[in-house]
Amino acid sequence: MNILEVNNLNKYFRQPTEFHVLKDLNFNVEKGKLTSITGKSGSGKSTLLYLLSTMDTDFDGSINISENEIKGKDNNWLANFRNEHIGFIFQFHFLLPEFSVFDNVMLPALKLGKLSKEEIENNAFELLCLLDVADQGKKKASLLSGGEQQRVAIARALINQPTLIIGDEPTGNLDSQNTAIVLDLFKELCKEKGQTILTVTHDEDFADRSDRIIHLKDGRIVT
Amino acid sequence: MNYINRIKLTSYIGFTQLWAKKTQTIVAIAGVTFGIAVFIFLLGCVKGVNQYITELSLEQCPDIRLFNETNISEDAVLDRVHIGENNIVHHPKPKNILLNLRDAQKTIEKLNSNPAVKAVSGIVKSQVYYNFGSSKINGEITGINYEDENKLLDLESKFVAGDSKALSHIPNSLVMGKKLAARLNLNIGDKIVVTTDKGFDFIATLSGIIKIGIPDQDKTICYVNTKTVQTILSVPSSYITDINIKLYDRSLAPAMAQSLVEQHSCSSSDWLKDNPLLFEGDELNDIVFKCIAASILLVAGFGIFNILNMMIYEKMKDIAIIKALGFSDNDVRMIFMIQALTIGFIGAILGLLIGLILSWLATFIPFESEYFLSLDHLPMCFNILYYILGLLFGLLTTSLAGYLPSRKASRLDPITILRG
């Protein structure tokens, strides 16, 4: 079953001059697979990720996530959809600095509002344990080291058990040991919970261990 | 997601951000606090003084006055003789009539039994000259029944010298305004020759000096006993020129005056007609005051606008993040509106408190006036209405000032910020 279907996707940057970033992309991603997107800088990886994450809606063609067409939906619908179905891990950790680690992880779940606060707290604690940052839970996010913040950001992306997890170099700030932990966690999520992971990476080991590699070159898929 | 949860969550985010930026928040709150405090203090001052002066003037003025005026008759005799013809009379003059009110005594009795009436006093006024050495000074004496007039205007409390009882007991005794007595160089017990407009002289003794607080009245007022005036005018004891009425509820005066005029065919005036300047001045004051208050709040509002705008600039990345997490545009707007309203509410409440304290302190500022007898400190007004108004103004300006920045935040495109 395909969780993600991309058809004839074209993306242009209009400022400062018109620039064709993504050219006629067509690909599908199966449910429960870990897919890596690779490519040189400027090849359009991040742009593709932002489109797939539904934050950027300015594109031609079609993006279909869990049988929902993204094209033409309004901001409100997209926000709710993102909240429930997509977990996004940024290139830079991007935590809310004034909030505690727990708060940062719990916010998307509180917004979703499907579980009680206690249940959300338990889930957040479990995730932080898995990523080995539970002991920092009460601290303000801004007081953590870069690697710790990155792991908290991963926990935040996973809290709502999204169908699609999108990462923009999620292990970019991590040492090899933590990278291994995250990679194992990702593989486990794919296998056991059937979640789909799509991530941009420069790490060749990471790419090699994923189920599939999509290589971008000058806005086109090269296989 | 239900609405209460949504408000809870957005307020939690809003409060956390406000708490994290304490200095900024305090500055923003202080801006509102200052505006509202000045608003309350100024309003209290201006309104307090206005009310004091109004009360003083109205206390000194009967609610309704009934009197007769010399009027020219509306129809000329010619019209009655040559009916239907085009009669023109140039410069008609009035007849010589007595200025007394008909059946005054009965009217007074009737008014006294009216439950809406607090006090009634029948008085006799006459033009006189005070003989001051070789010169004559123009004036007016008012013949009163001391007990009645005292009930009406509380004369007792206005005496600065002499005996208040003398007026009713000692024949030919006078009570004068302080300034008039000073002008005529009279002390208690001094005698003065008063000449009526009909040329009749009589000698009177100054038995009391009063100070009302309104300079014009203190310069002219001169009370004698009704009987004395009736005697020197050689008119019967039923001769009453004015009836002054004080009501329990002042606002009924115009309507009541109208009906009395119809019943007794005389002229009337009420406190509104007698003090037009006072109320027009009040209105002007109000307008000026509202402008001042509006500009203060505008400045406070602009401060909030600036600070919220600045906060949003600083928080652009955070806004992009929470949007990426699935918070909608409306959630973001709500977060910033909650911040604006929190600043407005806390600022307004503090402002009201500080305004109240300042106003309260101001009542201890000694204020001595030559005119205002009963005034030894600044009169302040503590009307709850102004406090409610202050709170509403505070909330209104902050929500207006918060609206534009919040809308801007809600429209931020997360991609442009996250891409860096």
Image: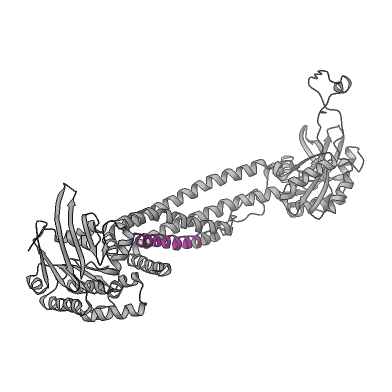
Based on the picture, tell me whether residue B41 belongs to the magenta stretch. no
- Residue A19 in picture, x, y percent from top left: 14, 50
- Display coloring: one colour
Q: Residue furthest front?
A: A1
Q: Nearer the viewer, residue B246 or A162?
A: A162
- Dominant SS of magenta comes to helix
Determine whether B18 is above or below B203 in the image.
below
Q: Nearer the viewer, residue B308 or A31?
A: A31
Determine whether B209 is above or below A36 in the image.
above
Per the rendered image, the range of residues in magenta is B325-352
- Residue B247 in picture, x, y percent from top left: 76, 52
Determine whether A210 is above or below B126 in the image.
below
The quadrant of the image that shows the N terminus of chain B is: bottom left
User: Could you tell me which residue is drawn at 68 percent across and 50 percent down?
Assistant: B56
Residue A4 left/right relative to B274: left
Instruction: Tell me, yes or no, if residue B357 can be seen here.
Output: yes
Q: Nearer the viewer, residue B315 or B127?
A: B315
Q: Nearer the viewer, residue B124 or B229?
A: B124
Q: Residue furthest right?
A: B236
Determine whether B197 is above or below B121 in the image.
above
Q: Which quadrant of the structure image shows residue B81?
A: top right
- Residue B175 in picture, x, y percent from top left: 79, 47
User: Could you tell me which residue is drawn at 81 percent across and 55 percent down?
Assistant: B115
The quadrant of the image that shows the C terminus of chain B is: bottom left
Residue B219 left/right relative to A210: right
